[in-house]
């Protein structure tokens, strides 16, 4: 399924689909592949270096407003930390991770227990955004989930690179 979704995203890029359409397709593909066990949020760095919503089809608007314009910071959440470090960041349990001290009330209110985030990188290794996955159970991503998101994040990078950073 990952290869199909990535191939479809490549076709969408060539056909001139908007970045939002492509990222929404990739986020939805990841959620479907997980069998409804997760919710995905793709955040994109804008020209000011702040994280902005790229596609989060199953997160409420008030949640997205609360995390809009986060600065990359290794000490905050999973997406901000992944954007700052360029590394995968895993939080199996929001209640036990100090990176979520100021934000944990947001995902907990939606019934999420943990999350992880993979940086979306350009072909030259520059961080363009993050591919975040929220879980309702306390757990870490499986190797299969990591591989799936790695492939989808590469497809997301193509769409982001094509359009460049959003206005800040």
Image (cartoon, rainbow, N blue to C red):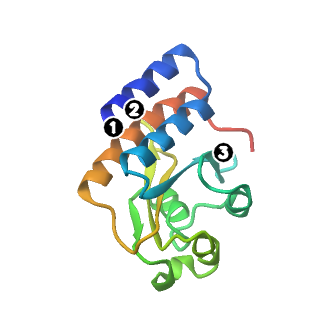
Q: Residues within 10 Å of mark 2 (few under 14, many from 20)?
A: many
Q: Nearer the viewer, mark 2 or mark 3?
A: 2
Measuring 49% from the left and 78% from the top, which residue is drawn there? Answer: 94
Residue at numbered disc 2: 5
Contact? badges 1 and 2 (CB < 8 Å): yes
Q: Residue at coordinates 55% horizontally, 77% vertically from top-left?
A: 100
Q: Nearer the viewer, residue 15 or 121?
A: 15
The residue that disc 1 covers is 2
Left or right: 38 with respect to 77?
Answer: left
**How much space separates mark 1 and mark 2, taking CA atoms?**
5 Å
Mark 1, Cα crowd under 10 Å, few <14 / some 14-19 / many 20+, is some
For the N terminus, the image quarter is top left
**Front tag of 1 and 3:** 1
Above or below — where is 65 with respect to 149? below
In the rendered image, which quarter contains the C terminus? top right
Asked if one can make out residue 69 in the rendered structure from this viewpoint, the answer is no
The reply to whether discs 2 and 3 touch (Cβ–Cβ < 8 Å) is no
Gap in angstroms between the C-alphas marked 2 and 3 = 25 Å
């Amino acid at each position: 399924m990952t290869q199909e979704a990535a191939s479809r995203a490549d076709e969408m890029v060539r056909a001139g689909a908007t970045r939002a359409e492509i990222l929404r397709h990739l986020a939805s593909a990841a959620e479907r592949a997980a069998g409804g066990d997760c919710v995905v949020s793709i955040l994109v760095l804008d020209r000011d270096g702040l994280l902005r919503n790229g596609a989060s089809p199953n997160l409420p608007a008030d949640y997205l407003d609360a995390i809009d314009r986060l600065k990359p910071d290794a000490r905050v959440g999973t997406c901000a930390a992944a954007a700052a470090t360029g590394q995968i960041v895993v939080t199996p349990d929001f209640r036990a991770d100090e990176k979520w001290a100021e934000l944990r009330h947001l995902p907990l209110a939606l019934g999420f227990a943990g999350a992880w985030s993979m940086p979306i990188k350009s072909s030259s290794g520059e961080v363009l955004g993050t591919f975040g996955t929220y879980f309702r159970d306390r757990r870490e991503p499986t190797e299969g989930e990591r591989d799936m998101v790695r492939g989808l994040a590469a497809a997301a990078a193509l769409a982001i690179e094509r359009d460049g950073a959003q206005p800040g």
